Image (cartoon, rainbow, N blue to C red):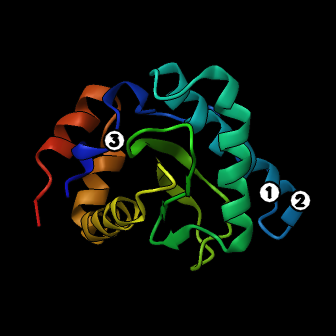
Amino acid sequence: MRLTNFIVRDAIIPALTTTGKDINPLDTSAVAGVKERAIREMVASLGTAGCFRDGDLEDICRAVLRREQLGTTGIGKTIAIPHSRHPSVERLVGTLALSREGLPFESLDGEPVFVFILLVSPQDRPGDHLRALEAVVRTMRNEDYVRQLRACTTRDEIWNLLENAPGW
């Protein structure tokens, strides 16, 4: 599976408006607020791209945030993969968002996150969900690729890089 199989081009966010400036990474309440704002921004982007009904936005945000409470999706090396399954989507959808300054996200390595890939999949397709997570991890394991991705400034640049990502 390739990232372009599920990332919605029109939902890509080249620069999140959510910031973590002046946030103490040890202040769990402040970090939780940053995480929630970033997740809401990404879910809203998928909604604007027509991936689900506007009325489902809040419920999808809650589902992703509930998953985040089980354990951070900040996998380290500047990457986070917030995700959830939800009945409002008929197929796996995702977005990629970049943070220019990095956000505190309780990552496993304690470092800020610069690259976010948010996934929402149907509840009845756990295999697609797992394959997508695997594809993200495999692609983002390449530090040179992540560096190139972080250097992108437009949706088109990001999409072109995604299209040319090595396939496995």
**In the rendered view, does 28 fall on the left or right side of 151?**
right
Q: Which quadrant of the figure contains the N terminus?
A: bottom left
* 116 sits left or right of 53 in the view: left
Kindly indicate the quadrant of the structure image that contains residue 140.
Answer: bottom left
Decide if residue 23 is in sight here: no
Q: Earlier in the sequence, mark 2 or mark 3?
A: 3
Q: Residue at x 46, y 28 (%)?
A: 51
Q: For the point 51% across and 43% down, which residue is it?
A: 100
Q: Which residue occupies 74% across, 47% down?
A: 62
Q: Amino acid at mark 3?
A: Ile
* Callout 3 crowding tier (Cα within 10 Å): few <14, some 14–19, many ≥20: many
Instruction: Using the rendered view, name the quadrant where residue 161 is placed.
Output: top left
Q: Position of residue 9 (x, y in %)?
A: 32, 30
Q: Which residue is mark 3?
A: 7
Badge 1 local density, few (<14 within 10 Å), some, or many (20+)?
Answer: some
Percent coordinates x, y for residue 91 in the rendering: 38, 42
Mark 1 and mark 2 in contact? Answer it, CB < 8 Å.
yes
Closer to the observer: label 1 or label 3? 3
Q: Residues within 10 Å of mark 2 (few under 14, many from 20)?
A: few
Residue under pointer 1: 32
Cα–Cα gap, marks 2 and 3: 30 Å
Q: Quadrant of residue 146?
A: bottom left
Q: Position of residue 145 (x, y in %)?
A: 23, 59
Question: Which residue is the site of mark 2?
Answer: 29
- 100 left or right of 8? right
Residues at circles 1 and 3 in contact by the CB criterion of under 8 Å: no
Q: Amino acid at mark 2?
A: Ser
Q: Earlier in the sequence, mark 1 or mark 3?
A: 3
Is disc 3 placed on a helix, strand or loop?
loop
Mark 1 and mark 3: span between their CA atoms?
Answer: 25 Å
